[in-house]
Amino acid sequence: MEAYKFEDITLIDDAIALIRRRRAMYLPSETPGPYLAGKLIQDIALLGALPARVARDGEWWLVSADRDWLRAASGVVSTEPFVRIVPCPQWGRYAFRTEVLLTAFAEAVVIAADACLTWIAGDAAGVEPPDALRVPGPGRHVAFRLAADGGAPMP
């Protein structure tokens, strides 16, 4: 086996663009909405934030859990899993959090907790969030709406 040197390693500057270019590698399903919602529910379960639910509201997919899986014990909410590949080796050798896939393949992603909406992706001025996020219940809620092309790879 050939040994790698530090110079052989390429750092990923834009994880979202990399994921979009390799759509089939990260989104192996012809039905991306149910696939992404299911993967996020799996992550929520592994993080111990059950019970969790999936629902549809028109074109929006809604994933909710009674416990806020993005909030650290310190009270700080991290949106990092939505913008970069966050490894989770305890779940498998090459496992990573699903949230980044939502940002890569959805035209809009909104998170809600404590009656506060945060837009992760999409134009808050041009897109109405689903009604279920206007007065969210306790816990953490994520809504995503797929791009019209279903998250086709970038040219």
Image (cartoon, helix red, strand yellow):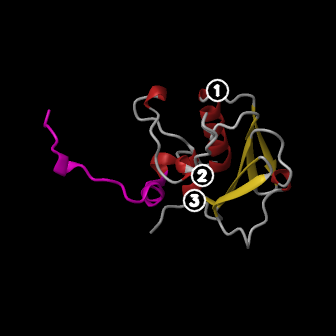
Tell me how far mark 3 sits from mark 2, CA to CA.
9 Å
Task: Return the x and y of residue 59 as percentages of the image width and height.
Answer: 76, 57
* Amino acid type, residue under disc 3 in the picture: Gly
Q: Residue at x 47, y 43 (%)?
A: 86
Relative to residue 69, is residue 131 drawn left or right?
A: right
Residue 10: within the magenta? yes
Residue 14: within the magenta? yes
Tell me how far mark 1 sits from mark 2, CA to CA.
20 Å
Task: Tell me the residue that label 3 is attached to.
Answer: 151
Residue 115 is marked as none
Task: Tell me the residue that label 1 is attached to.
Answer: 48
Front-most of 57 and 13?
A: 13
Mark closer to the chain start, 1 or 2: 1
Task: Return the x and y of residue 55 as percentages of the image width and height.
Answer: 79, 43
* Closer to viewer: mark 1 or mark 3: 1
Residue furthest out toward the bottom: 126
Q: Residues within 10 Å of mark 3 (few under 14, many from 20)?
A: many
Task: Tell me the residue that label 2 is attached to.
Answer: 102
Q: Residues within 10 Å of mark 1 (few under 14, many from 20)?
A: some
Mark closer to the chain start, 1 or 3: 1
Task: Return the x and y of residue 85 as percentages of the image width and height.
Answer: 46, 47
